[in-house]
Amino acid sequence: MSRMSENIKPLIATERPRFWRYSYAAGPVRSKFLIEIRDNKKLLGTKCPECGRVYLPARATCIKCFVDMDEWVEVSYRGTLMSYTIVYQPLEIHPVETPFAYGIIQLDGADTGLAHMLGEIDFKDINVGMRLKVVFKDERVGDIRDIKYFKPV
Amino acid sequence: MGERIAIVGVGQTEFKSRWMEISQTEMVNIAVNRALENAQLSMKEIDTVIMGNMELFEGNYLVDMWMTEGDGAYMKSGMKVQTGGSTGSTVSCTVFDHAASGLFGTVLGIGFEKQDEGSSDASLRSISEDSFFDIAGGARGAAAPMIEQALEMLERGSVTEEQIARLRVQEAEAAMRNPYAHLRKRLTVEEVLNSRDIIPPLKILHMCPTSVGACAIIAAPEKVAKKISPNPAWVADWVTIHGGVQPPIGHFGMCLGKGPLGPLWAFGIETASIKLYKRNGITNPRKELDVVEPYNMSTWHEAEWYERMHLCEKGEAGKLIDEGATALDGDIPVCPSGGVVSTNAIGASAMLRIAEAAIQIRGEGGDRQVSDVKTAFAVTAGGDSYSTAVLLRKSLTDY
Amino acid sequence: MGNRPAQPDWVVNSERTVKGVEEGLKVSQDLDLPDWIKQNDKNAYEMAWKKYSGESKAYEKLNKNGYIVVDTMVKLPFAESAGMHLSKFFTALRDEGKILANRCPSCRRVIFPPRVLCGYCRIRIPYDDEKSWLEVSDKGEIISYSIVSEREVDRATGLIQGETYPCAFIRLDGGDEWTIAAHFLEERNEAKIKDGMRVQAIWKPKEERRARMTDILYFRAIDE
């Protein structure tokens, strides 16, 4: 691959593609969160014993208080859209074809937002503040994509 | 002039080959909590968090931002530092710089690695390759310079293979006394001599493992340290040497043992040690240091570091081994923790040298405690001869 | 895609790796390579097969105990610029079959491959000054060599990595002590290779050169 520049002779560049495989340990807390979705279609968050914040997706430690969170709470299937974007540029990692809508949804009962896709909706009808409900896939494997998308209520 | 500083807390996880039941964040959290407990501090009292690991091994860019709930860095100042194998020690030196600046009350440093989540070989091969000149498919990595070093030592007559085997047995003994070490198995000289060759004379038992685990240290400037800690390990001095000198052959020159600077890492270790000795009036390290924790990535390297740290004359490393001088009950114990050859979670390894030296100063070494430690020395090496040296003292006036 | 139930990524990726290993093993035995290399590759593939099918089972076991593994592939399409000095070097390789080095204007040492700065003097080496450039020979002597006895199987693809030719450091004539090229030797038989042996670069035909070090195919022993 070479490129011409104005006063400089042709420059050389080399392709250096990298292809790696990683296998992350979700850890006990995130694993339980995903397994509850997979096996029981339940959305469980962890609750901080000090500040009472409920984290969904579940985390092991409260970010503010730096304490372990052992309490699990079930969170509603319904929530509010906090922010969204429409994705047009396709990337291999995308679970669906572009364009698709992607947003942050705060489920009732949780103090944090969950980033996921929006479905069964025209882009022009999406509004920040709108109410949404989770739709699960029929076949679930223990992955955040076991949630298919969020649809309008 | 900076503030005088001390290490007031140390924490580490147990180290193992695989730990897929726990996430990186949770693993780091264990070490951090142990360091806080050791220092009798809460996370609220930590001002800044410095952390480091070799990101490509886990494939997490901006790992410091990703694990703020685990390392406690949320809304605190701090940064990520990475220098290859010496990462843990440069994180530590960054912690020391912060503490010595007088701008921070307490500084937390973390080094970790979770290599069971990636393929270290692929990552190491791709990042240590020169795009234009390493056409042999990365047939080097860290092993090649290790073999170079070993060959050089045999040629020079510093050690025999039998002495190296005995040293390896000594290192294994040390690891047996360290409940956190990864490889904890008694070895015999025959086992070492008969173990599989990687490339002669380097054998599989001479090599460090790939470990999973985390280490954390907490440092503070003098007035804070004196207030919060009954048992500070004073950091008398520290130095970093950036040894990335332009090698003659593109990237390969560093691996040619007969290059202008000698085998990889040796130059950095020696320069850092000498600089630190000079600044601190140490003229006879073997006598003036009570315990040493160098970065012994292979048994051969431990022997080489004896010479490079001037614990003995050049060519005399074998003598030190024969005398048993560097064993726990010797006159200059080296790596009572078992060293990198027993535990190598890369991001943590270099910090462990400093942490273990601090543990020795504070008398918290349990079965691996050396008696009457007043002065401890930790020296590390990493990617392309980046070295750090740290001098710790029990008292800044009496030594 | 058939009636197979949905699988977690670590099953999909493990299977892909194992499939890569199986196919790689088949292909490797048909290649035009010495038997000992083919045998080594076979061993490497067989070990890899055990390792990577075992991995899948290990993750399944973890899963049953309540621990999820999130498997992912990372693809990064980097391209690196050679810069002016190396571009001149690679262009000369491709277009003229010449190997260039440059010289520090201060300490006068020969720098190979050519660089922007002399690392010892820390001064810039001029690009446009002809006196800074020199041609070195494509003949030289072997300083050190290494026979690749075990190649490694890549975890992402399941395919074996690296070259089959011995790697060598070759000091090229016409430069100084450190004018050393890292390249391959044509001779795979260890008994026929010695440090100090004279070798000559064998170039690819001009139309196959791509402005890379691999425009030289390998170095062949010569009687000199």
Image: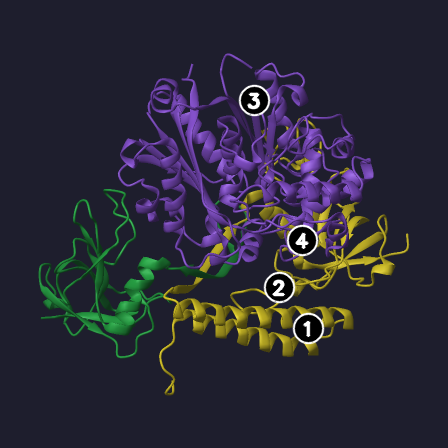
Chain colours: A green, B purple, C yellow
Q: Specify whether disc 1 shares its chain with disc 3.
A: no
Label 2 – label 4 distance at C-alpha: 26 Å
SS type, badge 1: helix
Q: Is residue C192 left or right of residue B379?
A: right
SS type, badge 3: strand
Q: Is any part of residue B262 visible from this angle?
A: no
Kind of residue at disc 2: Gln
Q: Which mark is residue C161?
A: 2
Front-most of C99 and B121? B121
SS type, badge 2: loop
Judging by the rendered image, the residue that carries numbered circle 1 is C42
Which of the marked residues, 2 or 4, is nearer the chain's N terminus? 4
Q: Nearer the viewer, mark 3 or mark 2?
A: 3
Q: Nearer the viewer, mark 3 or mark 4?
A: 3
Front-most of A42 and B250? A42
Judging by the rendered image, the residue that carries numbered circle 4 is C93
Front-most of A46 and B328? B328
SS type, badge 4: helix
Q: Are marks 2 and 1 in contact (CB under 8 Å)?
A: no
Q: Position of residue C87 (x, y in %)?
A: 58, 48
Q: Is residue A3 left or right of residue B177?
A: left
B273 in relation to B131, above or below: above
Crowd class of label 2 (few under 14; some 14 to 19; many from 20; radius 10 Å): some
Kind of residue at disc 4: Leu
Q: What chain is tagged by disc 2?
A: C
When asked about the image quadrant of residue C101, the answer is top right
Which of the marked residues, 2 or 1, is nearer the chain's N terminus? 1
Judging by the rendered image, the residue that carries numbered circle 3 is B375
Q: Residue furthest bottom?
A: C2
